């Protein structure tokens, strides 16, 4: 047979389907996989499923016959695979905005920047854990007011503790003086048990009693909790800030959220000794720290800084 006649014969066979195996077509991309087959589902004729990487179509009603089956009910539609987006359109990646634990406006990094030499007792976690005691603390007003209040609180805390270094009052000679024996509950923990402790140096038996009642803690009988539990220590400081006028006319919280100014927070904490010219150097120390802290938090200091 000549070469030309042989080629004609091969072409004829190809048309007749005889040479499919000799001249295979280029395989197409796999179809997307249909819903996976489930034994409990009843499928009617025409329903499509996928199983072990292949698609199948039911010819009539069937249930609980695993494709490809033995009864002939499943028509094999071929290999399937998962669909993927084209390379030019990758799925979007959504990154949630960073949030601070407890919703506090001061991040842990900022807290560390404010108190680089703090005692390890004063943990950021302890502070965040104390916020639930007074939800309005540093969460009242707009974002600027909230940051100003947090900065004011932490600036006074810095001053009271030497940068969160001291857990207890350093002048031990003062310890016996903080028992007001005229109070009906007395000083059950001892005459010298109510010295300054914690971030705002809580002192006097009547303050321990009032803070303990407000916070649901046995501080009158066990005042040492303020120097052994960081969250308790922070709670007592926030309690004083939110509820006590001290020698002032308003709470430190109200001073900041009403615009009375940082100077009134000094008056509420130690105004009897520092304000009205009592100790201008101490007042300026608090003001300078407050200005530093609002700078870290990116807000202005506001007016009325001194007392």
Image: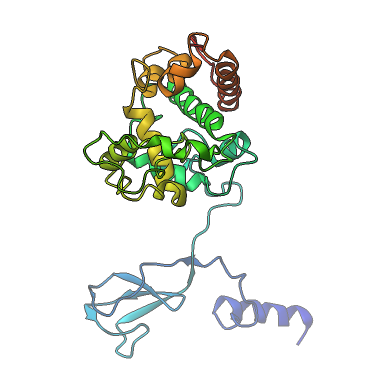
Q: Position of residue 272 (x, y in %)?
A: 43, 17
198 and 139: which is toward the camera:
198
Q: Relative to 124, does residue 32 appear above or below in the rendering?
A: below
Residue 45's x, y, as percent? 25, 73
Q: How many marks?
A: 0
**Front residue (pair 73, 40):** 40
Residue 202 visible? The answer is no
Choose top left, top right, bottom left or bottom right for residue 49. Answer: bottom left
For residue 173, above or below residue 286:
below
Choose between 177 and 296: the one closer to the eye.
177
Q: In which image quadrant can residue 7 be found?
A: bottom right
> Could you say which quadrant of the image residue 69 lies in?
bottom left
Quadrant for the N terminus, please: bottom right
Q: From the viewer's perspective, is residue 178 above or below residue 223?
A: above
Expressed as whole percent of the image width and height from the top left, the position of residue 224 reads 41, 49
Give the x, y percent position of residue 57.
Answer: 34, 74
Check the image and report above or below for 197 versus 255. Answer: below
Q: How is the image coloured?
A: rainbow
Residue at horizontal 51 percent and vertical 38 percent from the top:
173
Q: Along the horizontal axis of the image, is 254 left or right of 121?
A: left
Q: Residue furthest bottom?
A: 70
Q: Is residue 98 visible?
A: yes
Of 96 and 306, which appears nearest the observer? 306
Q: Residue at x 31, y 38 (%)?
A: 211
């Amino acid at each position: 047979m000549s070469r030309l006649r042989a080629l004609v014969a091969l072409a004829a066979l190809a048309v007749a389907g005889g040479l499919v195996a000799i001249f295979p077509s280029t395989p197409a991309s796999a179809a997307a996989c249909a819903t996976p087959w489930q034994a409990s589902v009843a499928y009617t004729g025409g329903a499509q499923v996928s199983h072990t990487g292949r698609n199948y179509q039911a010819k009539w009603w069937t249930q609980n016959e695993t494709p490809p089956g033995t009864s002939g009910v499943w028509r094999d539609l071929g290999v399937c695979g998962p669909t993927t987006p084209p390379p030019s359109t990758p799925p979007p990646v959504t990154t949630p905005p960073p949030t601070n634990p407890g919703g506090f406006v001061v991040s842990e990094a900022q807290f560390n920047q404010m108190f680089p030499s703090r005692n390890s007792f004063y943990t950021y976690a302890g502070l965040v854990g104390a916020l639930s005691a007074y939800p309005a603390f540093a969460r009242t007003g707009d974002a600027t007011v909230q940051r100003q209040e947090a900065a004011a609180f932490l600036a006074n805390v810095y001053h009271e503790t030497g940068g969160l270094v001291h857990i207890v009052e350093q002048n031990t000679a003062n310890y016996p003086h903080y028992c007001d024996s005229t109070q009906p509950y007395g000083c059950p923990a001892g005459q010298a048990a109510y010295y300054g402790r914690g971030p705002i140096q809580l002192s006097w038996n009547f303050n321990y009693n009032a803070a303990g009642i407000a916070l649901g803690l046995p501080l009158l009988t066990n005042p040492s909790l303020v120097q052994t539990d960081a969250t308790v220590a922070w709670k007592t400081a926030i309690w004083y800030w939110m509820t006590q006028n001290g020698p002032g006319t308003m709470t430190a919280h109200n001073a900041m959220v009403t615009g009375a100014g940082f100077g009134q927070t000094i008056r509420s904490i130690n105004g009897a000794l520092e304000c009205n010219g009592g100790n201008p150097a101490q007042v300026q120390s608090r003001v300078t720290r407050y200005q530093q802290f609002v700078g870290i938090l990116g807000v202005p200091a506001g007016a009325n800084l001194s007392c």
